Image (cartoon, rainbow, N blue to C red):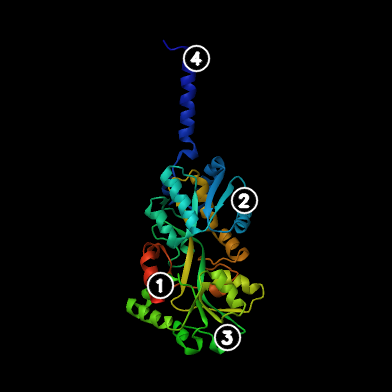
């Protein structure tokens, strides 16, 4: 015969189990993403808020610098003060290594992961990320998100030609890749030996044969090969060389704003490199994860990134700090490029003699 104390214990256990099973936090990210996909904005937000209040935090792994995430966090917390936005920062390979290692080891700590989309394809390949939707997707430019919902552009960087205004006359500013073959630029142009995405973009726009032929001719211009957009920007700003063929426009423009004599030109094919949002399939805080992505991808969140932080936005009709880089791209450096990165890099470096 079961004693009364045991009965009360069993009843208490069953009540706790039912309450836990019915709580918002019991749902998985894939289940939640499917549930909210067809909800209108207000219903979706109400459901996510309810669950996020129980979860209390969201863990964001991203390549965005800590000081910039602090600005984003302040704005997000003003809207949703009950969610603590936590952040782990590392360059893109560090983000991938940590995320993949934790996933394989069963330690699922990340809710939202942000990295260069061409590297983020590994999150899809490993089964770490899960498709999700966001209410403002129709406002985003072509190619700036995955049609299947695996990633959306948190912010983007536009690839631009950069020149020193004190060294390049307005009439001589290159406006096409063909202009770079002019003999007057021989030995005077900086180029990143790892910018294989330029080859991919040219092949996409011109075809493989024409792209390879052009790059072979460009290689004969005695290019000065330097890795890193930041270093390249510093060299051109200091007058070491008059031109850099491919830099991150929005980032370099920050140096111009500090007084450097820099100008920019967008060459076709126009290229953007999106830094994409991926949501973890096993996110420990699914409601807070989707609430954070929805807000960041909304007009309110994008204004913080574009206006306050000077990032490029893929959202149409948004005021941005650097309007000159707002463009409908010809090529997006996406997961497809990432899956072929090793092949492209080898062929690109062979052309420029860096292997």
Residue toward you, 280 or 14: 280
Label 4–label 2 contact, CB within 8 A: no
Mark number for residue 168?
3
Above or below for 77 versus 20: below
Residue drawn where x is 53% and y is 58% of the image = 63
Q: Which residue is mark 1?
A: 349
Mark 1 lies on a secondary structure that is helix
User: What residue is rendered at 46% in x and 82% in y?
Assistant: 222
Front tag of 2 and 1:
1
Please say if 123 is above or below 139.
above
**N-terminal-most mark, 2 or 1:** 2
Mark 4 and mark 3 lie on one chain; the one further toward the N terminus is 4
> In the rendering, at what x and y percent does residue 239 appear?
61, 80
Q: Nearer the viewer, mark 2 or mark 3?
A: 3
Q: Does 89 sit left or right of 257 as displayed?
A: left
Question: On the image, numbered disc 2 is attached to which residue?
Answer: 77
Residue beneath label 4, please? 5
């Amino acid at each position: 015969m079961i004693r009364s104390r045991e009965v009360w214990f069993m009843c208490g256990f069953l009540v706790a189990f039912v309450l836990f099973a019915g709580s918002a936090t019991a749902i998985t990210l894939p289940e939640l993403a499917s549930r909210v996909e067809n909800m209108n904005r207000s219903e979706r937000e109400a459901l996510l808020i309810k669950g996020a209040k129980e979860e209390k935090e969201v863990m964001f792994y991203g390549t965005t610098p800590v000081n910039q995430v602090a600005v984003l966090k302040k704005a997000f917390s003003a809207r949703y003060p009950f969610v603590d936005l936590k952040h782990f920062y590392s360059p893109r390979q560090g983000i991938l290594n940590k995320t993949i290692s934790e996933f394989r080891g069963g330690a699922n700590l990340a809710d939202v992961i942000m990295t260069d989309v061409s590297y983020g394809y590994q999150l899809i390949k490993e089964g770490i990320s899960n498709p999700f939707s966001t209410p403002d997707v129709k406002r985003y430019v072509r190619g700036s998100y995955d049609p299947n919902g695996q990633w959306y552009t948190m912010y983007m960087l536009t690839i631009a030609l950069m020149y020193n205004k004190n060294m390049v006359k307005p009439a001589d500013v290159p406006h096409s890749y063909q202009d770079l073959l002019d003999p007057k630029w021989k030995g005077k142009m900086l180029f990143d030996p790892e910018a294989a995405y330029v080859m991919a973009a040219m092949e996409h726009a011109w075809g493989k044969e024409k792209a390879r032929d052009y790059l072979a001719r460009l290689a004969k211009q005695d290019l000065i090969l330097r890795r890193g957009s930041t270093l390249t920007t510093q060299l051109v700003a200091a007058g070491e060389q008059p031109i850099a063929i491919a830099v991150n426009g929005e980032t370099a423009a920050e140096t111009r704003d500090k007084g450097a004599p820099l100008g920019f030109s967008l060459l076709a094919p126009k290229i953007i490199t999106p830094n994409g949002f991926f949501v973890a399939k096993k996110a420990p805080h699914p409601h807070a994860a989707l609430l954070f992505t929805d807000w960041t991808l909304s007009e309110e969140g994008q204004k913080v990134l574009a206006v306050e932080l000077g990032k490029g936005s893929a959202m149409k009709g948004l005021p941005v700090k650097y309007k000159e880089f707002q463009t409908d791209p010809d090529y997006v450096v996406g997961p497809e490029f990432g899956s072929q990165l090793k092949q492209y890099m080898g062929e690109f470096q062979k052309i420029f003699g860096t292997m």
